């Protein structure tokens, strides 16, 4: 168990895409660091101007009378909706015993659907100690469309009325630092980094780094990403804005940059594209079980050169082509089982063996990262694995040489408007993350 350290930190951060000042605070637990910055980039209907109300106190303070029905005394309670639950049992869990309220909610179609239609909607009530409903709100979140619906039901003059609101979550910029003890995903879990952000990180470095093969113990990550907050709660995350990896002696950096009129891409701090001719791995996430070189053959025994790299992965794991090209072979071939060869524009080929199924045809054009089949154990294989080959002029060459090849279609992001500001901001964030990580290590 690691000692829990607390550290507070403030800094001014500057969001280049939407100039704004914000305060950054950090909370640190063990080696995981989370920091929160606030950017008023999106309109924020939830945070109105703060109004301070000062009222003189009377000479005597009366305590609320709890013995009788007191209209001024309220209980607040919240619960998440459950699947296949009736309105009655939900209200019971919230301590509401109110026939009028129940019949209103049952009649109101929007209320009914939000309260009993799906699980995980947050219901909050204000009620009297005796269970009479004063107000109720129910919030549903659709993370894919980033939409939030909030229904508010209030009793006014003995009559219930409902209204539907669509509050806009507040955009935050979060900073997370983590170091790897076992696997990348174990590290992100420990630091509380959402899986969607972890997946974008792997994608950002897909041309540089095989997260299973090349990541060293103690590798340090700084991740800067968008998160959206409402009522003090993170509802969903957005774009990974930047990532820095200290892996042994090497430092990799990627920042998200969206030039005007483009979809956006990960680029280096100098503006060169992170896009590579070849991806570092044919599987998004995998482990190498046997490298290129001499080895004892697992099925036939005897020393024999292994002419590829084996990736262990569960059967059915999608296999992606590491570069664009044309499928030159797709079908059964002896010990290879189901086998696909893709010929790339540089005339070199990559090949994929033991596939459970093939999802491309010979002659078909494929894009980099496109799924061409799934991991299996067809042909001569001891279990599900991908045997991956790199063919240079038809000769099976060590696939580890692929990652050193860089793209010849580097885009010059640095000359684009806004790039220098974005790069400056991200550089500052990476420095901040490093100083926080160093402080926590002392
Ligand atoms: Zn193999």
Image (spheres, rainbow, N blue to C red):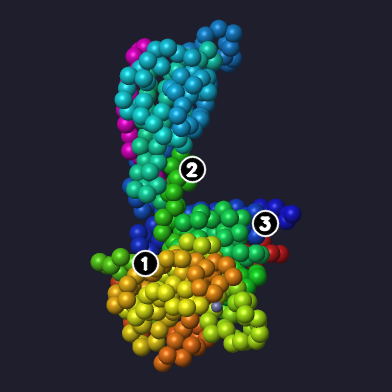
In the rendered image, is residue 157 in sight?
yes
Residue at disc 2, secondary structure: strand
- Left of 190 or right of it: where is 49? left
- Report the span colored magenta: 157-170
Q: Is residue 32 above or below residue 376?
A: above
- Left of 249 or right of it: where is 161? left
- Residue 158 included in the magenta stretch of the image: yes
Figure quarter occupied by ligand 1 = bottom right
Residue drawn at x 34%, y 14% as measured from the top left: 159
- Residue 353 included in the magenta stretch of the image: no
Residue drawn at x 39%, y 57% as measured from the top left: 20
User: Residue 337, position in %: x, y?
Assistant: 47, 73
Residue drawn at x 36%, y 53% as measured from the top left: 41
Q: Is residue 368 above or below residue 159?
A: below
Residue drawn at x 65%, y 70% as measured from the top left: 217
Between circles 2 and 1, the one closer to the viewer is 1
Question: What residue is disc 1 on?
Answer: 359
Q: Earlier in the sequence, mark 3 or mark 2?
A: 3
Name the quarter where the C terminus is drawn. bottom right
Mark 2 CB near ligand 1 (8 Å cut): no
Q: Report the disc number at residue 30.
A: 3
Question: What residue is disc 2 on?
Answer: 233
Q: Report the disc number at residue 131.
A: none
Camera-side residue: 138 or 331?
A: 331
């Amino acid at each position: 168990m690691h000692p829990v350290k607390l550290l507070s930190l403030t800094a001014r951060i500057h969001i280049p895409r939407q100039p704004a000042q914000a305060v950054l605070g950090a909370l640190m637990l063990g080696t995981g660091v989370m920091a929160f910055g606030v950017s008023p980039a999106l309109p924020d209907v939830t945070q109105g101007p703060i109004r301070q109300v000062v009222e003189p106190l009377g000479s005597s303070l009366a305590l609320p009378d709890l013995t009788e029905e007191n209209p001024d005394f309220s209980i607040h309670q919240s619960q998440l909706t459950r699947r296949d639950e009736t309105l009655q049992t939900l209200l019971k869990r919230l301590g509401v015993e109110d026939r009028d309220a129940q019949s209103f909610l049952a009649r109101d179609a929007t209320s009914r659907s939000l309260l009993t239609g799906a699980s995980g909607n947050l219901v909050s009530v204000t009620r009297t100690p005796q269970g009479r409903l004063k107000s109720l709100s129910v919030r549903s979140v659709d993370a894919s469309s980033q939409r939030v619906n909030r229904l508010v039901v209030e009793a006014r003059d003995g009559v219930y009325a409902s209204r539907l609101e669509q509050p806009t979550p507040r955009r935050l910029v979060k900073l997370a630092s983590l170091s790897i003890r076992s696997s990348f995903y174990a590290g992100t879990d420990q630091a509380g980094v959402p899986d969607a952000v972890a997946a974008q990180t792997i994608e950002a470095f897909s041309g540089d780094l095989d997260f299973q093969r090349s990541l060293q113990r103690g590798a340090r990550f700084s991740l800067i990403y968008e998160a959206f907050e409402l009522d003090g709660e993170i509802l969903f995350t957005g774009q990974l804005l930047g990532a820095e990896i200290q892996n042994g002696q090497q430092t990799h950096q990627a920042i998200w940059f969206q030039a005007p009129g483009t979809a956006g891409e990960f680029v280096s701090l100098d503006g060169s594209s992170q896009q590579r001719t070849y991806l570092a791995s044919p599987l998004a996430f995998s482990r190498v079980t046997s490298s290129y070189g001499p080895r004892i053959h697992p099925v036939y025994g005897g020393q024999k050169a292994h002419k590829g790299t084996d990736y262990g992965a569960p059967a059915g794991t999608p296999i992606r082509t590491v570069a664009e090209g044309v499928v030159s072979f797709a079908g059964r071939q002896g010990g290879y089982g189901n086998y696909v060869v893709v010929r790339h524009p540089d005339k070199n080929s990559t090949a994929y063996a033991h596939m459970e199924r093939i999802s491309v045809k010979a002659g078909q054009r494929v894009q980099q990262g496109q799924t061409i089949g799934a991991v299996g154990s067809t042909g001569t294989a001891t279990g599900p694995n991908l045997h991956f080959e790199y063919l240079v002029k038809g000769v099976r060459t060590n696939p580890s040489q692929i990652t050193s090849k860089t793209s010849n279609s580097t885009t010059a992001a640095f000359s684009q408007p806004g790039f220098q500001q974005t790069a400056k901001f991200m550089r500052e964030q990476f420095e901040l993350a490093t100083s926080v990580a160093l402080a926590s290590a002392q």
